Amino acid sequence: MVTNTSNQADTGREEYSFSAIEQRWAGYWEKNKVFQPADDGQRPRKYVLDMFPYPSGDLHMGHAEAFAMGDVVSRYWMLRGYDVLHPIGWDSFGLPAENAAIARDAHPAEWTYKNIATQRASFERYAISVDWDTVLHTSDPEYYRWTQWLFLKFYERGLTYRKNSPVNWCPKDQTVLANEQVVDGACERCGTEVTKKALEQWYFKITDYADRLLEDMDALEGKWPDRVLNMQRNWIGKSTGASVTFAIEDGPAIEVYTTRPDTLYGATFMVVAADAELAEELVTHEHAAALKAYREELRHVSDIDRQSTDRPKTGVFLGRYGINPLSGERVPIWASDYVLSDYGTGAIMAVPAHDQRDMDFARAMGLPVRTVVDTGEDNPEETGQATTGTGANINSGELDGLTGQAAIDNAIALLEAKGTGYKSVNYRLRDWLLSRQRFWGAPIPIIHCDTCGEVPVPDDQLPVELPKNLHGQQLAPKGKSPLEAAEDWVNVSCPTCNGPAQRDTDTMDTFVDSSWYYMRFVSANNAEKIWDRDKLDRWGPVDQYVGGVEHAILHLLYSRFFTKALYDMDMVNFTEPFTRLLNQGQVLNGGKAMSKSLGNGVALGEQLDAFGVDAIRLTMVFASPPEDDVDWADVSPAASLRFLARAWRLAQDVHFADSAPGTDASGAATALRQITHKVVHEAESLLDDQKFNVVVARTMELVNATRKEVDKGEGAASPAVREAVEVIAQLLSLVAPYTAEDMWALLGHEPSVSRSAWLTVDESLLVEDKITVIAQVQGKLRDRFEVPADISDEDLEEVARNSPNVQRSIGDKDIRKVIVVKGKLVNFVVG
Ligand code: ANZ
Ligand code: ZN
């Protein structure tokens, strides 16, 4: 490389050509393992990770943005002297591969690994700073062997279990979905409306960790985006209140969950979830037919509509009564769809005066409303508007006169004394449904034996590889797992009793694969162990994680759960996987997300061909703060390209300059050095604060200042210019690796610029030589200016007098007095 570049000395100057430069450096970093961590304990470590890609085709603009951001962090840390782990892999199981295989009558592996090869080549061209020796794919048996092993570790601890329950079912993809994968009642992947189906399914007991998942977020405050933390908190949805037992006439008591036990005297009826078993248990003989009809009706109402507050409330009376434990009042029990079967106990005490849903129901059914909290608003009994504020209790017996928390605490104390209630906590979070009835995933490593029941596959028989003889049409969804068709594979002998047994035919949700990959990267090639514990202790957790906000809930929550469970098993020494999180924005076009239907897509490959890798990367980073969206219609990769050419020509100028010592002692050279050191100094904090776009702006300023200096004749030979151009090359290496590497070589250095030493800022050059002063008239601010720090009082007064704003404000009044506060302000007293 170096030889090649210095040959230019013989042939003369060149024009900046991104394609020539890309060719010069293509493959250099990978071949020379520039981005391989030394792991020699000589330097402090940093672990940077981009959310690993799904091999859905070639890379797109979104990848280009995300990886440009991750690269700024990893390349910067490397320049700061850290030993950096920055790995890459592929999240390569999942439905699209399977659907493509069915459509083309091929094997999902074919499509998957072909796309991986394409993406990998594009990543190499894009010059991301990763270690290519530790690549992993979650669909490799060497990887999913450990996914299965973890499943069994969780199983041993009772964190994996199987149960029969109504689950979300996508009729199009013919698979179950986790609650998290149902968006507005529709399948997250294909948009088909989700239905319910009773199935035997596998779950992870993430609810055991609800409290820790919530509490440990305090430590992420300020390090993760607020909105992600909020989304996680809402998803976990902790609420505190009371469990209250209502006796039932001629039946067993039922418990309800309420956040407002203080409103108990206003509970004028009860409602149970219409689709819950409880409704069937409670309904009297004469009302059974009505309940049955109502349930039948509900089958045609989507989940979204059920929850909608606009929709009129519906329901049926169950013919039975409960007894309010505080007032002793007899209250009718209804069934309705607005009460959810899988939240709380699936039954509520309805307080129409203070809960709008209950009010709407009471109005629709003609049920009584009783105000029990005087909030000062209009009486809900008359308005039909539930009042939810605080105020003193009324109509509430022993609770009368109490307010807010005191009323709640007293209500709970009363319930506890009577043995009919207690303080309790509720979570929205549900256990994680992890089994899928699809082919392209890690098989569940369980064998079902008629004699022994569920038998874990012994460690030495892992991985349970996917059957090889299934492909194409055989994978078509049929409401049960396609693996069932592979009889040779399914039928095995029981590891415990040797009797005939069957393999579990479900596969795991791909979120299981991605819940632990960041740990595997520390020893991706280890064939004996899931990871080398010492290495994980050294490198983990991830210092900086970079990825899209679409993973704000599921992936991050699951990864956090895995980390905590593994911590409890003494397999890792940290409890949070990602210390810092950066959510890069989206790349839009014309204000909208790029999409086929809008026809506003921009092909990354075409952009790279037209402007070069560096200009595209620079454009991505320069366009906006990393967390903001970039609108491709508003940016100019052509301008980025011109800037890169300007920067590169500086290196060429230095390369061809007379090696005679320059006029470094001159004031101008010192001024350039001041700018250089200031830019480096600022870049340090800007990069720590993830203001990458501002760093690019500063680099542009430095290029301009350096160009001015060079154009003063002998300028390019000055050590100050060389210093500036070296800094430019280093800063550019964060976003424009090819150009930066070429500049570094032109400056006569050994590659790679990524391994060069960061400039130590000379504090004496940072002295601020300009100050801002203000001009006042009668004490009112009229103007402000930048002046030399050592300006005399007379000169300062002169500058202020000449300000048009000041003159306008003085008008034809006389100046009585001029007050000059050295280095700060000038005040004109007039009259
Ligand atoms: C009486 C009451 C009076 C309530 C009042 C609220 C206001 P969060 O905060 O989300 O946890 N609820 C309980 N279980 C339910 C279910 N399965 N389906 C629908 N609603 C349910 O909500 C808890 C409140 O939501 C509970 O407190 C209960 O209504 C209702 F002035 O009880 B409340
Ligand atoms: Zn057995």
Image: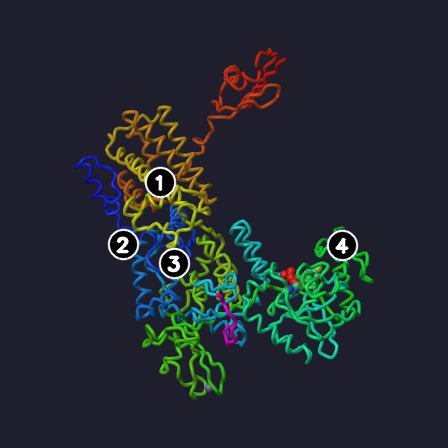
Give, as a three-letter code, the residue at label 3.
Pro
Mark nearest the camera among 4 and 3 is 4
Tell me which label, 1 or 2, sits earlier in the chain. 2
Q: Residue at x 47, y 72 (%)?
A: 435
Give, as a three-letter code, the residue at label 2.
Lys
In space, the residues marked 1 and 2 are separated at their CA atoms by 33 Å
Q: Where does the C terminus fall, quadrant-wise?
A: top right
Q: Which mark is residue 379?
A: 4
Q: Which of 229/188 is in front?
A: 188
Query: What secondary structure predominates along the stretch shown in magenta?
Result: strand
Residue that numbered label 1 is attached to:
636
Secondary-structure class at tag 2: helix
Is the distance from the Cβ of mark 2 to the nearest ligand 2 atom less than 8 Å? Answer: no
Q: Are marks 1 and 3 in contact (CB under 8 Å)?
A: no
In space, the residues marked 1 and 3 are separated at their CA atoms by 27 Å
Tell me which label, 4 or 3, sits earlier in the chain. 3
Secondary-structure class at tag 3: loop
Give, as a three-letter code, the residue at label 1.
Ser
Q: Percent from the top left, x then y, of residue 707?
A: 32, 30
Q: Percent from the top left, x then y, of residue 50?
A: 41, 55
Give, as a three-letter code, the residue at label 4.
Asn
Residue 195 among magenta residues: yes
Tell me which label, 4 or 1, sits earlier in the chain. 4
Residue 626, compared with residue 411, is above or below; it is above
Q: Are marks 3 and 2 in contact (CB under 8 Å)?
A: no
Q: Please say whether residue 345 is visible from this viewpoint.
A: no
Q: Are marks 1 and 2 in contact (CB under 8 Å)?
A: no
Q: Please say whether residue 60 is visible from this viewpoint.
A: yes
Q: Give the magenta-colored segment's residue range.
A: 193-202
Q: Residues within 10 Å of mark 1 (few under 14, many from 20)?
A: some
